[in-house]
Amino acid sequence: MGLAAPGTSQRTDLVVLVVLAAAMAHAGWNLLVKLMDDQVLAFWLLNATSAACGAGMWAVAGSPQVVAWPYLAVSVALHVAYNVTLLNSYRLGDLSRVYPFARGLAPLIVTGGAALVAGESLSTLQLVGVAVVAGGLASLVWLGGAGLGGGGRSMVLAAVTGVLIAAYSLCDGLGVRHAHDTVGYAGALFAIESSIIVVGLASRRRRVPRPPSTDWLRGVLGGALSVAAYGAVLWAQTRLALGVVSALRETSAVMAALFGAAFLHEGSARRRAVAALAVCAGIALLVVG
């Protein structure tokens, strides 16, 4: 399978634009989470919103086909583990360093995994594009020579997060193709996964504190953005090669790094522009290839 499933180049361009928009939304919800002082509360609010949205989608679209449920069940477990590692990564390291490191690993693993389990092969230019995108993302971590921040534990958590991203991306890519219904699959995934996280986070405390109005808005908006972003990615995975979708999606790390510099004062935006240019070059190779 190449860049796109059978269809016109205009449709391919539309899917690429949708994934890039999803990347922006993904970076946005990560910024909103990082802006909140209480990270546990942030993830609780985000997942409560995601669970509600997912339940609504599931009710409207119905359940995905039975053959997709094993993939969905594994994906739920992977997503829960991902949220745990991401939460702890953010408590130890900067958004502009932890996020790009975790996201930069995923395209490489997804591309290799898709070749093994889905029989997808990319052109030489596309493979170079994936490598350039991943390299550009990884370079964000060491801009300025500061590393990840938070010590070795932060690096380990970020690496585990990256592996989990690749694992659930592959699992969902196969699952949503078997489901033949993106909305139903996405709704079931969000409702089950986020409900588990909401209960788990609430159990860590005797009660969930009442957040300030600004945090409430950030949490709800973040949850809505996360549903829209990943729902769009699931849709794209039925139309493009999984490795290409992963590489396009992970451009969110460049946006997150720029957000971190602009809003959280985590380093220089000028230095991050170099990595952004590399990632843009990788995207061009993916599209042209």
Image: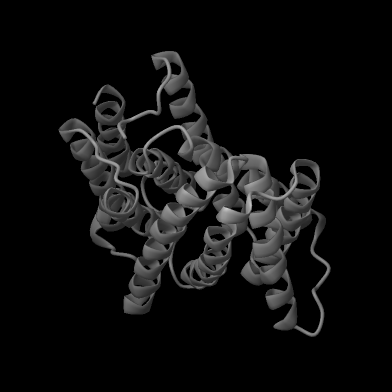
User: Which residue shows up at 58% across the image and 65% down it?
Assistant: 73
The one of 27 and 233 positioned closer to us in this rendering: 233
Q: Where on the picture, by quarter, is residue 35?
A: bottom right
- Horizontal placement of 149 versus 188: left or right? left
Pick out the residue farthest to the left.
124
Q: Is residue 52 above or below residue 199?
A: above
User: x, y percentage for residue 287?
Assistant: 31, 25
User: x, y percentage for residue 32?
Assistant: 62, 52
The quadrant of the picture occupied by the N terminus is top left
User: Which residue shows up at 80% across the image and 42% down it?
Assistant: 60
Residue 99, can we see it? yes
User: x, y percentage for residue 143?
Assistant: 27, 53
User: Which residue shows up at 16% across the image and 34% down it?
Assistant: 124
The quadrant of the picture occupied by the C terminus is top left
Q: How many marks?
A: 0
- Horizontal placement of 206 versus 231: left or right? right
Coloration of the structure image: one colour
User: x, y percentage for residue 74?
Assistant: 52, 66
Q: Is residue 15 above or below residue 53?
A: above
User: Which residue shows up at 48% across the image and 34% down it?
Assistant: 19
The one of 149 and 104 positioned closer to us in this rendering: 104
The one of 168 and 25 positioned closer to us in this rendering: 168
Q: Is residue 25 above or below residue 40?
A: above
Residue 27, can we see it? no
- Horizontal placement of 274 versus 180: left or right? left
